[in-house]
Amino acid sequence: MTIRIAQITTEPLDVEAHRAAVDDPRMGAEITFVGRVRDNDEDAATPVVALEYSAHPDAETTLRTLAAQAIGDSDALVAASHRIGRLEVGDAAVIVSVSSGHRDVAYEVSRELIEAIKHSLPVWKRQIESDGATVWKGLGG
């Protein structure tokens, strides 16, 4: 099991840094998932203009645990980050890069980790709409 990056940060996320972290000549497959702030939400009355993310102090430790669980006994290498603070439309909120010897493992680990982040990482977001309305998302799982 190798976790190359597992971080919660206020800094903009760098896709190429995540890809470089899992670059390894032994690996034949690489997957990178980027979750970005979008300008819409099915529950929003007006366009979404920003998301404000906040995290529990243990979120980075939890991210590392989730990455380890997703890797399991596979050969996968993982780099994963979640940004907190105010993010504008188009900003990357989460990046998961995975490499492995074979594509099926890379897909499986990537999918498992991003789903675990979505459901189990103690990070919450406040959605801000163009009319000034705000709503908390992700509270309670």
Image: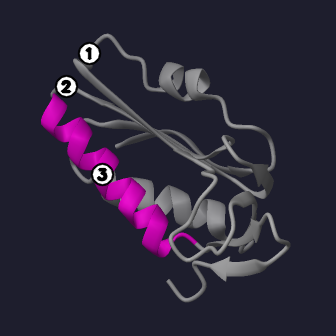
Label placed on residue 77: none
- Residue 30 appears at what percent x and percent y? 32, 25
Local packing at callout 1 (Cα closer than 10 Å; few below 14, some 14-19, many 20+) is: few
- Residue 1 appears at what percent x and percent y? 34, 43
Mark 1 highlights which residue?
26
Mark 3 highlights which residue?
111
Local packing at callout 3 (Cα closer than 10 Å; few below 14, some 14-19, many 20+) is: some
Alpha-carbon span between mark 1 and mark 3: 21 Å
| Residue 3 in view in this figure | yes
Tell me which segment is drawn in magenta: 103-121
Q: Relative to 114, does residue 116 appear above or below in the rendering?
A: below
| Residue farthest along the top direction in this orientation | 25
Nearer the observer, 3 or 31: 31
Which of discs 3 and 2 lies nearer the camera? The answer is: 3
Q: Is residue 112 left or right of residue 130?
A: left
Magenta: main secondary structure equals helix
Look at the numbered discs 1 and 2 and tell me whether their residues touch, using CB distance below 8 Å. yes
Q: Is residue 118 left or right of residue 40?
A: left
User: SS at mark 2?
Assistant: loop
Alpha-carbon span between mark 3 and mark 2: 16 Å
Q: Disc 2 residue type? A: Gly
Q: Residue drawn 30% across and 51% down? A: 111
Label placed on residue 101: 2
Q: Is residue 44 left or right of residue 2?
A: right
Q: Is residue 93 magenta?
A: no
Nearer the observer, 53 or 18: 53
